[in-house]
């Protein structure tokens, strides 16, 4: 199949890089988004999200005349839907009292409806948004057929999940293998032809529902593995073991690859997608459900570690402030609010949840997020820079392993803060160096003294 014009609906972290990549590979691309700020920014030749290399490729695509932006879809040879699939905000599912999150498919529904007036015989429609299994067949297909055209006969319809890692999107878009699932084999073939325009990785054809499952299986596998790592961290603290050392030794085993524990699982993918399986079949997914619970409770684990940190140093300070256990009045410098290192995305971020939990316990938190220095984040007091964050702190709390934070010199920090207590939740700092600089450094997954009860 030949394509001249492509319409991409949804210009977020996936849609904009994908639209630009198709445009610099020769297609005429119309980028569509319901957010006027996104369209105005693009029409000014700028971008609204941080991703390495994205500004350059967008500039190239716009200057070539191949990428334009609008809030309205138009007729095209192919349509690509890459809109968000978050949770329903005020509604939970219930299975024997077990509450679970529900997918909000409003944006996908609206995008499919927006395509109907422009759908023509021979067109291709691709759903890329991560969606519960059977969304393409049971939700998108019937909407598109309101055009009077039949999917798989008059037009092609397929599902093709993006699998790119934020921070490496433009490279992975081209290099990663791509799964294309059609509602018919011909649809899968048409999807193959579209992505073959720039994908250098293997392109595999299958059916739409299998492709949907594949995507959610990938992210669910990662979520369950991270949950296991987080449980290992909790166990290690109980046993007086350094979990980071233990993981690096276990990963020497040829068939073991334990992921990293941390302050929690954030972002719009790993912390969201497994719920699509739980929603689809709560009776079949006890493990997936439990893993979500473990990862969603990790911010509380960090809260307890902060209390522990103050408690362990209380010997020295109790005389001064008299408030023994509560965090009330404690000044905490929170370093990092993004959901993971070196990205500007704060969606579902465990770090912001931890700050909210600390504040609810009466702590005064000043947060510094270098990737979103001016962010107004609900109820979080943002510092103007790193120095401002640590200056009056009692505790320096590292929540995100941004490269710049890893490189911090503890002596330099010691000269800028009165704190001598630090907590590293992401295994970024060298304990000896920080201790030499005068800090008592506590680390997630490391307990110097075992807390095992004597038999
Ligand atoms: N995390 C840990 N420990 C780890 C790895 C990650 O706690 O060992 C945390 C991170 O800090 C973050 C969250 O998990 O809060 C997710 O981060 P991530 O880097 O694992 O993944 P995402 O969400 O940025 O991207 C994932 C990727 N999926 C997989 O690797 C299976 C990416 O390939 C997908 O395209 C993306 O989800 C998506 O859009 O679905």
Image (tube, rainbow, N blue to C red):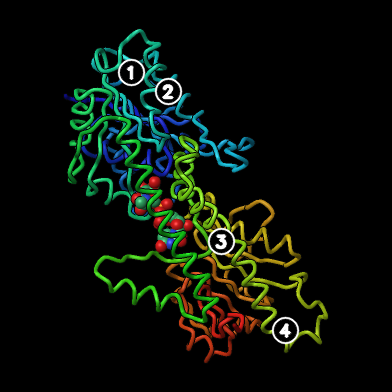
The image's mark for residue 75 is 1
Q: Are dots 2 and 3 in contact, CB under 8 Å?
A: no
Nearest the camera: 35 or 428?
428
Query: In the figure, 443 relative to 191: above or below?
Result: below
Reading the image, the residue beneath label 2 is 139
Mark closest to the chain's N terminus, 1 or 2: 1
Image quarter hosting the C terminus:
bottom right
Q: Residues within 10 Å of mark 4 (few under 14, many from 20)?
A: some
Reading the image, the residue beneath label 4 is 314
Q: Residues within 10 Å of mark 2 (few under 14, many from 20)?
A: some
Nearest the camera: 418 or 105?
105
Q: Residues within 10 Å of mark 1 (few under 14, many from 20)?
A: some
Residue 8 horizontal/vertical position (percent): 36, 30
Reading the image, the residue beneath label 3 is 298
Residue 451 horizontal/vertical position (percent): 59, 80
In three-dimensional space, the C-alpha distance between marks 2 and 3, rounded to whole angstroms, equals 35 Å
Q: Secondary structure at mark 4?
A: helix
Image quarter hosting the N terminus:
top left
Mark closest to the chain's N terminus, 2 or 4: 2
Quadrant of the rendered image holding ligand 1: bottom left
Report which quarter residue 380 is drawn in.
Answer: bottom right
Mark closest to the chain's N terminus, 3 or 4: 3
In three-dimensional space, the C-alpha distance between marks 3 and 4, rounded to whole angstroms, equals 24 Å
Residue at 54%, 53% (x, y): give it. 293
């Amino acid at each position: 199949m030949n394509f001249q014009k492509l319409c991409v609906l949804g210009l977020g972290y996936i849609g904009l890089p994908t639209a630009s990549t198709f445009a610099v590979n020769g297609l005429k691309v119309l980028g569509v988004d319901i957010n006027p700020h996104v369209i105005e920014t693009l029409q000014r030749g700028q971008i609204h999200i941080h991703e390495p290399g994205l500004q350059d490729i967008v500039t190239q695509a716009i200057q070539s005349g191949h990428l334009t932006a609008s809030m309205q879809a138009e007729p095209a040879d192919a349509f690509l839907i890459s809109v968000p699939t978050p949770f329903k905000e005020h509604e939970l599912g219930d299975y024997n009292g077990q509450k679970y999150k529900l997918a909000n498919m409003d944006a996908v529904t609206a995008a499919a409806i927006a395509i109907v007036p422009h759908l023509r015989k021979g067109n291709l429609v691709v759903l890329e948004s991560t969606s519960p299994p059977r969304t393409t067949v049971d939700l998108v297909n019937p909407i598109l057929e309101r055009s009077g055209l039949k999917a798989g006969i008059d037009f092609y319809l397929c599902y093709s999940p993006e699998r790119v890692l934020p921070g490496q999107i433009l490279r992975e878009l081209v290099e990663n293998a791509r799964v294309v699932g059609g509602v018919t084999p011909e649809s899968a073939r048409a999807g193959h032809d579209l992505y073959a325009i720039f994908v250098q990785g293997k392109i595999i054809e299958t059916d739409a529902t299998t492709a949907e499952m594949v995507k959610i299986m990938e992210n669910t596998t990662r979520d369950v593995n991270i949950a296991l790592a987080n449980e290992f961290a909790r166990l290690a603290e109980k046993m007086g073991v350094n979990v980071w050392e233990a993981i690096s030794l276990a990963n020497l085993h040829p068939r073991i690859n334990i992921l990293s524990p941390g302050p929690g699982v954030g972002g719009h993918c790993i912390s969201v997608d497994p719920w699509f399986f739980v929603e689809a079949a709560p009776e079949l997914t006890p493990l997936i459900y439990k893993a979500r619970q473990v990862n969603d409770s990790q911010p509380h684990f960090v809260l307890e570690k902060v209390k522990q940190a103050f408690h362990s140093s209380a010997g020295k300070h109790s005389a001064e402030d008299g408030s023994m256990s509560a965090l009330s009045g404690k000044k905490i410098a929170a370093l990092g609010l993004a959901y993971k290192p070196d990205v500007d995305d704060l969606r579902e971020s465990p770090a912001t949840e931890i700050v909210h939990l600390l504040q609810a316990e009466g702590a005064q938190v000043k947060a510094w997020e270098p990737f979103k220095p001016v962010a107004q984040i609900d109820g979080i007091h943002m510092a103007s820079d790193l120095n401002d964050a640590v200056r009056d702190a009692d505790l320096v709390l590292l929540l995100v392993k941004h490269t710049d934070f890893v490189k911090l010199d503890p002596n330099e920090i010691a000269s800028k803060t009165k704190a001598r207590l630090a907590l590293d939740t992401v295994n970024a700092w060298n304990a000896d160096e920080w201790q030499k600089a005068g800090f008592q450094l506590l680390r997630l997954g490391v307990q110097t003294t075992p807390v095992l009860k004597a038999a």
